[in-house]
Every structure is written in C-alpha cells, then in structure tokens.
Image: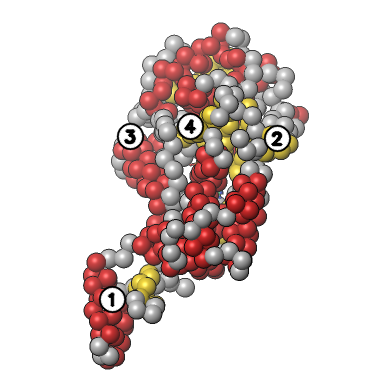
C-alpha cells in the first residue's frame, strides 16, 4: 500500500500514517454548529477533510468518516459563558431551537452536495447522544477529575499535568486571565455539564435530567463521546479548524485523559483559515458569503472547490471574487478538455505515480494541481490518455470534470432558446440568432459558440 505522510498537531511533525487496523481508517471531523447558514469559510474546512478522505480512498484505504452535528451546548463565549448559540439563534429567527437545528442541518447537507463532498458514513447529533454524554461525564467524575459549582460540573484541569501541551499553551497566562466565573478553580477549567438557569426567569428549550440536575452538556464532551462511539477508542484521525487547537481539542484531550488516561485519536489535523480581505472569515463576524450567494452571483459552485484545492490546508488562502473567477476559468478549461476528447484512453502511469506521491505527502494539493496542468500541457501524452488520467485524478479532486457545463443546471427555457438559436444559425438567419442571444443574456446566461454546437454559461456578475 502507498505510504502516506500526515502532519500531526499533537507531535508537531509530519508522520508516516499507520492505521490502527491495517487498510482501514477512522476519521472524525468536528462538524457544524447548526444555528445559522454555513458560510464558505466553514465549507473550506469540509472540502479539506473531503480531500483527506478521498486521498486515502484513492490510495487504497477503506475510510469511515464521522462528522457530528452540534445542535446544543456551544456557547457564544469559549470560556463557558454567554448564551447557547442554538437558543440565541432561535430567539433571533423566532423558531424553536429544534426547528432551527433541522433547518441548518439541511442547509449543511445541501452544501456538501453542491461542493461534491462525499457523504460521511455517520452524522451524529449531540442531542441524540445525551445519555452517552452523561455516562462519559460520570466516568470522568468517578476518576476524580471534576468538581461541582453553582452553574455546572467542571473539568479540573489542574488534575491533568499535560493540559497545555497539545496547544503549546502558556498556562501561567491562562491562570492570569480575568475570570468572570469566580467559582471556577482555574480559568482553564471547562464545563462538562451546565445547569439550566434557575432564577433569571428564562427557560431553556433544550434541557435534560442528569445525576447532577437539569441542564445540558458542554460543547467538548459531545465530540469525545461520539468519536469513540462510532470509531472505537482510540481511533485514527481527528480533524478540525485551527481555532479548535487551543480550547476545543485541548479540552477533548483532557477528557480522554480523565476518562481513559490517554488521547482518543492518534493523529490530530487542523486546517488553517480562508480569509476575506485579510481577515478571518467566521460566522460570528456575520454577513459572509454562502455557497448560495456565490451561485446567485452566477458562479459554478465547484469553482470554489477548485479555489480551495489550489491552497494547502495548513496554510489557508485569501478569498476574492477575482480569484474565484480565475478558478472558474481554470475549471472550465479542464472540463472542456475532458468533455471534448474521446473515451478509451489509458491512465498515464508516470503521472499517476507522481500524483499519488504528491497527495500522499500531507495532501500537497497546490503541487497536485500544478501536476494536473503539467499533464494538460504535455505534448507527449495523447488527448484521450490525458482525459483518462484527469478523470482518475478527479477521484481525489472531486471537480466533476466529466460533467462539464452540465454541472451548471441550465433551465429548460434557456436550453430551448439556445436550440432555436442554433437552428437559426444553421439556416443563416443571423437577425433571429442575434435576437435570441440578446434575449438569453437578459435572462442571465451567455452563449459561447463551438463548431457545430454551443455552450451555455451562467452570466457571472462582476
Ligand atoms: P462552526 O459551525 O462555527 O462550529 O464551524 C465549523 C467549522 O468551520 C470549524 O471546524 C471551524 O474551524 C471551521 N471554520 C470556520 N471559519 C473558517 C474559515 N474562515 N476558514 C476555514 N475554516 C473555518
Ligand atoms: Zn468537535
């Protein structure tokens, strides 16, 4: 089997990947908090991890990926203060927290489909695993790692000597942090179970009975619970955004230590951020593009996937509509090459070996894309062999290169007008052909003439 090297945040090194069960891989990717529409920054993360899944499959591994749905317990402040994002979103949209979760979980699924991200094997919801989370908290409690205060059950980080190691945290600085919850023994301590508010007149929509009182789980416990439930303990790879290193994953590691005396995952991988005008794109900043916005602007959504593939997951990239436009042009060139050439070619072995080594080297996608273009320009490779090789690479790229402009969902009305225009051109009726071209343009589509056919594209708004 092909050797694979992956960068492990836990050891700060690129390591040769050795799955626990030979040939099989378990991957847990921290999933979305379903309180608002996922934006393209969130989807950057899921495209990166889809490339990981596809790469391992391409290299011969059997992969099981789990992506959780956070539908309770993620508070607006990382210090376990503030409102639950779900309860807050529910008030803002005047729907129940349950309906809000359903709505944005569906949107997330739609995003996965549009971006050609392979469906995870399991997408467990935090609210469907309350009993298991309570059981795990009880285990951590029985091992002596918790304490109870007025607003919940907390993990006592002083009991875990390696607490700051994973995130290279400066514990002295954290200790000196101004703490608003004065009952906590240490500012780094985090909630495993929070009690529903008692006296402030508000009633939570999402709350459950527990051995400690009515309340809800803290955010970090869901991931330790559901990753080990669906992938075993330990499992192979845990992924998330780099914003998770200092708190969410540091706390997951502490929970693993508290429950079993060790880490739950062998490799921890983190994606850097895609930035917008130099700033981080995050949902809390608000008002950022969603894939639906990009679609409304006339882009083929897979152009965004192409843009993400041009960056390395550990470096991130910066987003602009200009770079998206360039990505779309490049994607169209690749699709045209595939669609216009004959089938029956052979995958080029030399390029395939190079491609496997490149993607197997910590997912070096910018280099893999450079290789794609080297192949396209290589005059020694027959066009049909280029097509076969590109389609083989597309198992990792996921750009639907064989679909060409079909991927753009041209409405029937436009296709019919384009067919009439083609007929007008065939009989030399140029006035009618120009009229139809203009009419099609007013409806937001442009026609590009080929020899005996034409291509219809959505007009991209600049
Ligand atoms: P959330 O729904 O806020 O929990 O975020 C879901 C995922 O998106 C997390 O893994 C974040 O790390 C990731 N994420 C959020 N913003 C960005 C961004 N601008 N670039 C890359 N990943 C992001
Ligand atoms: Zn998580």
Alpha carbons under labels 1 and 3: distance apart: 45 Å
Is 404 situated above or below 193? below
Q: Helix, strand or loop at disc 1?
A: helix
Quadrant location of residue 267? Answer: top right
Task: Identify the residue at horizontal 61%, vertical 54% (top origin).
Answer: 351
Q: Helix, strand or loop at disc 3?
A: helix
Alpha carbons under labels 3 and 2: distance apart: 42 Å
Q: Nearer the viewer, mark 4 or mark 3?
A: 4
Task: Identify the residue at horizontal 44%, vertical 58% (top origin).
Answer: 344
Residue 284 visible within the image: no
Alpha carbons under labels 2 and 4: distance apart: 21 Å
Q: Is 349 left or right of 83, judged from the image as shown?
A: right
Q: Nearer the viewer, mark 3 or mark 2?
A: 2
Report the front residue among 61 and 444. 61
Q: Position of residue 80 (x, y in %)?
A: 55, 30
Q: Nearer the viewer, mark 1 or mark 3?
A: 1
Q: Earlier in the sequence, mark 1 or mark 4?
A: 4
Q: Please give the label number shown on residue 418.
A: 1
Callout 3: few (<14), some (14-19), or many (20+) C-alpha neighbours within 10 Å?
A: some
Q: Which residue is mark 3?
A: 98
Q: Which residue is mark 4?
A: 64
Q: Are marks 1 and 4 in contact (CB under 8 Å)?
A: no
Callout 1: few (<14), some (14-19), or many (20+) C-alpha neighbours within 10 Å?
A: many
Is 107 situated above or below 386? above
Q: Earlier in the sequence, mark 4 or mark 3?
A: 4
Whether disc 3's CB lies below 8 Å from ligand 1 is answered: no
Is 324 situated above or below 364? below
Q: Earlier in the sequence, mark 1 or mark 2?
A: 2
Report the front residue among 8 and 142. 8
Q: Are marks 2 and 4 in contact (CB under 8 Å)?
A: no
């Amino acid at each position: 089997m092909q050797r694979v090297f992956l960068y492990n945040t836990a050891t700060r090194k690129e390591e040769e990947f050795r799955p626990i069960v030979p040939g099989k891989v378990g991957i847990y990717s921290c999933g979305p908090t379903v309180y608002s529409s996922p934006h393209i920054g969130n989807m950057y993360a899921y495209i990166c991890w889809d490339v990981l899944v596809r790469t391992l499959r391409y290299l011969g591994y059997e992969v099981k990926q789990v992506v959780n749905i956070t539908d309770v317990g993620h508070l607006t402040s990382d210090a376990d203060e503030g409102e639950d994002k779900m309860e807050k979103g529910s008030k803002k949209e005047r729907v129940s927290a349950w309906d809000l979760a359903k709505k944005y979980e569906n949107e997330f699924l739609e995003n996965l489909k549009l971006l050609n991200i392979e469906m995870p094997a399991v997408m467990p919801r935090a609210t469907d695993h309350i009993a298991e989370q309570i059981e795990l908290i009880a285990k951590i409690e029985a091992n002596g790692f918790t304490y109870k205060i007025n607003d919940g059950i907390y993990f006592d980080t002083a009991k875990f000597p390696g607490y700051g190691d994973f995130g290279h945290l400066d514990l002295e600085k954290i200790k000196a942090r101004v703490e608003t919850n004065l009952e906590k023994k240490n500012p780094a301590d985090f909630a495993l179970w929070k009690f529903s508010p008692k006296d402030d007149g508000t009633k939570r929509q999402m709350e459950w009975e527990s051995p400690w009182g009515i309340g809800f789980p803290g955010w970090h416990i869901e991931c330790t619970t559901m990753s080990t439930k669906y992938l075993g303990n330990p499992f192979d790879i845990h992924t998330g955004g780099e914003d998770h290193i200092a708190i969410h994953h540091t706390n997951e590691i502490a929970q693993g230590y508290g429950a079993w005396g060790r880490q739950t995952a062998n490799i921890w991988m983190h994606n850097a951020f895609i930035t917008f005008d130099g700033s981080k794109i995050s949902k809390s900043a608000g008002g950022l593009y969603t894939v639906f916005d990009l679609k409304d602007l006339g882009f083929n959504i897979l152009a965004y996937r192409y843009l993400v593939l041009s960056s390395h997951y550990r470096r991130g990239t910066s987003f602009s509509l200009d770079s998206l436009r360039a990505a779309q042009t490049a994607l169209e060139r690749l699709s045209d090459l595939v669609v216009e050439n004959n089938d029956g070619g052979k995958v080029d072995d030399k390029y395939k070996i190079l491609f496997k080594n490149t993607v197997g080297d910590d997912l070096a996608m910018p280099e893999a894309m450079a290789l794609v273009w080297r192949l396209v320009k290589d005059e020694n490779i027959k066009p049909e062999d280029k097509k076969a090789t590109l389609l083989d690479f597309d198992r990792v790229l996921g750009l639907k290169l064989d679909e060409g402009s079909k991927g753009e969902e041209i409405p029937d009305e436009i296709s019919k007008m384009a067919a009439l225009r083609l007929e007008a051109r065939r009989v030399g009726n140029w006035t009618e052909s120009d009229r139809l071209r203009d009419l099609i343009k007013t409806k937001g589509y442009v026609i590009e003439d080929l020899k005996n056919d034409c291509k219809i594209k959505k007009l991209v708004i600049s």
